[in-house]
């Protein structure tokens, strides 16, 4: 009888422990580790722009830039999904994991990369039209001379993307129809009906060949899905591999649009899964000296 009670007690204890959140599932620990991951991919993506992080006395996290500007990471304001687009901080922009897998229809419920932290973009690429235009340069690519922002290696990433895209056309000539004519890159303008600057205003986005089914305000999801289904997956992959997010992976789809957001791609590449027990928060990133240095900085501050 005692053995039966002992066995039953242990079974009950095991079941209770199984439903108690682990330390890694605790809200504060999960938030902290997610912050660390975000800071790591940001410092990996912008090594010549971000030099350090700072934690204020009231717990706010700031990025310290090489130009001595200080940008808040998380304003800690409660926001709905629309406010996370219209008034995003850096944490908001990295909250939703961008899907690196190929898709064949409009995604539901997510717009990863559509929200932009404008204070951060201003510091990296220029905070006024005149400052942005000083950072623009023409890049000679296999698809022509293209104007793009030279900061944060955005222009270099575009050149590599277009050169690789042109190589794809050698094997499949139909891909030319999705690239040419290129619809545009730099254009200092706001997004219609929003008052917010377009990514094109910073010179960090390119629109490839336009199709009438490319934009969520032009057609319904069924027509958008048909366009996505036929869109060359290898063309999308070329841009993603070089740090661009594709507007075709937004619920509010913008299929001709590619935008340089290397931190979002790195977050998806290395941290798409939830942190597992027994693993370090940085597990998955390349084990090199520069990444170790960044990890040490983050661990020392947090």
Image: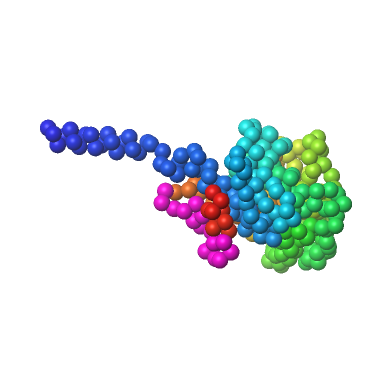
Do we see residue 210 in this rendering?
A: no
At a point 78% along the width and 40% down the height, the residue shown is 196
Q: Where is residue 190 in the image (x, y as percent from the top left)?
A: 82, 42
Left or right position of 277 against 99: left
At a point 57% along the width and 61% down the height, the residue shown is 293
Colour setup of the view: rainbow
Does the magenta portion include 233? no
Q: Where is residue 245 in the image (x, y as percent from the top left)?
A: 67, 51
Left or right position of 144 against 17: right
- Quadrant position of residue 234: bottom right
Do we see residue 126 in this rendering?
A: yes
Left or right position of 184 against 244: right
Magenta highlight range:
277-293
Does the magenta portion include 288? yes
Left or right position of 106 against 148: left
Q: Where is residue 296 in the image (x, y as percent from the top left)?
A: 54, 58
At a point 65% along the width and 47% down the height, the residue shown is 62
């Amino acid at each position: 009888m005692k053995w039966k009670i002992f066995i039953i007690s242990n079974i009950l204890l095991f079941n209770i422990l199984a439903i108690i959140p682990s330390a890694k599932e605790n809200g504060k620990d999960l938030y902290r580790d997610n912050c660390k991951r975000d800071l790591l991919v940001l410092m990996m993506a912008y090594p010549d722009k971000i030099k350090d992080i700072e934690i204020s006395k009231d717990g706010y996290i700031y990025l310290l830039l090489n130009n001595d500007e200080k940008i808040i990471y998380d304003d800690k304001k409660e926001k709905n999904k629309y406010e996370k687009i219209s008034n995003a901080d850096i944490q908001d922009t990295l909250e939703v994991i961008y899907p690196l897998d190929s898709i064949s229809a409009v995604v539901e419920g997510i717009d990863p990369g559509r929200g932009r932290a404008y204070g951060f973009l201003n510091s990296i690429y220029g905070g006024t039209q005149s400052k942005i235009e000083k950072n623009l340069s023409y890049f000679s690519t296999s698809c022509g001379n293209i104007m793009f922002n030279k900061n944060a290696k955005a222009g270099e990433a575009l050149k590599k993307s277009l050169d690789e895209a042109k190589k794809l056309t050698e094997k499949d000539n139909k891909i030319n129809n999705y690239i040419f004519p290129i619809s545009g890159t730099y254009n200092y303008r706001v997004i219609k009906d929003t008052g917010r600057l377009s990514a094109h205003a910073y010179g960090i986005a390119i629109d490839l060949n336009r199709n009438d089914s490319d934009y969520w305000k032009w057609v319904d999801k069924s027509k958008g899905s048909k366009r996505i289904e036929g869109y060359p997956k290898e063309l999308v992959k070329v841009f993603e591999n070089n740090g661009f997010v594709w507007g075709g992976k937004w619920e509010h789809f913008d299929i001709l649009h590619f935008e340089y957001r290397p931190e979002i791609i790195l977050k998806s590449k290395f941290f798409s899964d939830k942190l597992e027990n027994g693993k370090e928060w940085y597990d998955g990133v390349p084990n090199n000296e520069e990444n170790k240095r960044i990890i040490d900085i983050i661990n020392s501050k947090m």
